[in-house]
Image: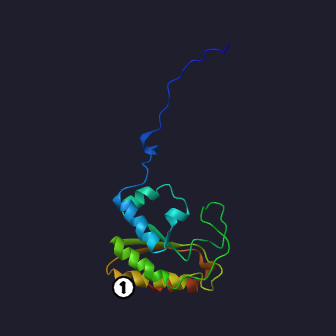
């Protein structure tokens, strides 16, 4: 015979820890725009637990220069490994997506591209320029990699005048 165990009250998760399953019209529209534009977000690639909240509010942090990083940082969930050349059409697709999503504030980040002489700074600048061309008055925040310590690369991005 097995001994009778005392039943303890079941502990419930606190409300702040509970997350709704992503969904809703806005979530699906953001997902559709990103997918049809062949764009990446850091939300998706870094496995962000808040993806559903952002997409449901019609926002996303665009990840440019592909979905693979040339580095393998232990703290990051973004894939790493061999990368192809940058897509010259990507800045235009980001600008188009920003326009379709009706964004007034945009966040752009990227994978690290140690394989590129400018670390991808030129693509950052083109993306900022294209977004502003399509959506005048939009605010653009950039989260840039270290560009291998290149002041020249950083200057390229700054000259595109992100906010």
- x, y (%) of residue 59? 39, 65
Residue occupying the point 64% across, 77% down: 83
- x, y (%) of residue 93? 44, 79
Q: In the image, is residue 27 above or below residue 86? A: above
- Residue 153: image quadrant is bottom right
- x, y (%) of residue 42? 51, 66
In which quadrant is the C terminus drawn?
A: bottom left
Q: In this orientation, which residue lies closer to the viewer: 112 or 163?
A: 112
* SS label for mark 1: helix
Residue occupying the point 67% across, 71% down: 81
How packed mark 1 is, by other alpha carbons closer than 10 Å (few <14, some 14-19, many 20 or more), is few
Residue 37 visible in the displayed image: yes
Q: In the image, is residue 145 above or below residue 150? A: above
- x, y (%) of residue 89? 49, 84
State the scheme by which the image is colored: rainbow
Q: Is residue 132 left or right of residue 71?
A: left
Q: Which residue is mark 1?
A: 133
Q: In the image, is residue 138 above or below residue 159? A: above
- Residue 15: image quadrant is top left
Residue occupying the point 65% across, 78% down: 114
In which quadrant is the N terminus drawn?
A: top right
How many numbered marks are there? 1
Q: In this orientation, which residue lies closer to the viewer: 17 or 35?
A: 35
Residue occupying the point 67% across, 75% down: 82
Q: In the image, is residue 87 above or below residue 40? A: below
Q: Is residue 1 left or right of residue 54?
A: right
Residue 59 visible in the displayed image: no
Q: Residue furthest top?
A: 1
Q: Is residue 86 left or right of residue 35?
A: right
- Residue 46: image quadrant is bottom right
């Amino acid at each position: 015979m097995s001994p009778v165990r005392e039943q303890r009250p079941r502990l419930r998760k606190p409300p702040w820890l509970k997350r709704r399953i992503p969904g809703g019209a806005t979530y699906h529209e953001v997902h559709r725009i990103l997918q049809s534009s062949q764009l990446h977000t850091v939300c998706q690639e870094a496995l962000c637990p808040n993806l559903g909240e952002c997409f449901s509010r019609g926002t996303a942090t665009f990840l440019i220069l592909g979905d693979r990083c040339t580095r393998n940082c232990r703290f990051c969930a973004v894939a790493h490994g061999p990368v192809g050349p940058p897509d010259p059409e990507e800045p235009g697709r980001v600008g188009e997506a920003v326009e379709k999503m009706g964004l007034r504030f945009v966040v752009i980040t990227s994978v690290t591209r140690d394989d590129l002489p400018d670390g991808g700074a030129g693509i950052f600048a083109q993306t900022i320029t294209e977004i502003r061309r399509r959506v005048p008055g939009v605010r653009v925040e950039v989260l840039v990699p270290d560009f291998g310590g290149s002041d020249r690369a950083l200057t390229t991005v700054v000259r595109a005048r992100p906010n």
